[in-house]
Image (spheres, grey):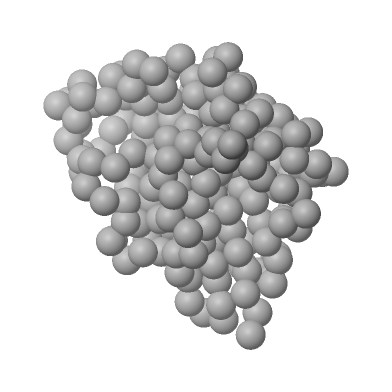
Amino acid sequence: MTRTTIGLLRHGQTDWNIDFRLQGTSDIPLNETGRDQALLAGRVIDANDWDVLLTSPLSRAKETAEIVATEAGFDTLIVEPLLLERSFGEAEGMKHEDWKVAYGEGTPIPGGESLEDLRVRCWQLLEHLAHTYPGRRVLVVSHGALIRKVIKMVSKGTLPREGERFGNASLSLISHSETEWSIEDYNPKTLVPVS
């Protein structure tokens, strides 16, 4: 039985993360804390445990991946457009609570990616990873809303728990065997080396 494992690593912190602003596809860079988080994640992650490292094209994910690659010992890094964050259209830059009031959970955002569009893209991503890297261990660096949607889909709605947020530089694992996806290790907390 072929088992493919996907590690979902969220990018390090940005200034907009501090303010709980919707970043979406706005290319907001890492701040110093985010770079430190990526460095620490790279000390926890061992490239020998992975076959390939992929990243979203947005700079906050790409820089996180580059720092992790250097620290953990990856030779190559592949940019994968399907790992792009959900587009929040004209809501990008809004604080999370203001977005909730203005649009609610299911209200379409002008210029944004709907939850259904995101769901379809996440399945495309999972199918792409399972078919391109069968039997391999794939570490991907992506974004909070995309990772949240993938985890929700794979867990059939049981995760993440109500009110739970994915910390910057957190790592959760999912796996694919034959036709079934499952949660291998759910960890929404920021990675830190064990002292």
Question: Percent x, y for residue 52?
Answer: 74, 53
Residue occupying image coordinates x 19% and y 30%: 100
Question: Percent x, y for residue 96?
Answer: 27, 25
Q: Along the line of sight, which residue is nearer the eye, 130 or 15? A: 15
When the figure is inspected, residue 136 is found, relative to residue 72, above or below; the finding is below
When the figure is inspected, residue 1 is found, relative to residue 158, above or below; the finding is below
- Snapshot quadrant of residue 194: top right
Q: Quadrant of the N terminus?
A: bottom right
- Left or right of residue 112: residue 84: right
Q: Residue furthest front?
A: 195
Question: Percent x, y for residue 77?
Answer: 76, 42
- Left or right of residue 170: residue 79: right
- Snapshot quadrant of residue 30: top right
Question: Percent x, y for residue 6?
Answer: 59, 58
Q: Along the line of sight, which residue is nearer the eye, 185 or 179? A: 185
Residue occupying image coordinates x 43% and y 55%: 186
Residue occupying image coordinates x 70% and y 41%: 79
Residue occupying image coordinates x 46% and y 14%: 15
Q: Is residue 93 visible?
A: no
When the figure is inspected, residue 72 is found, relative to residue 94, above or below; the finding is below
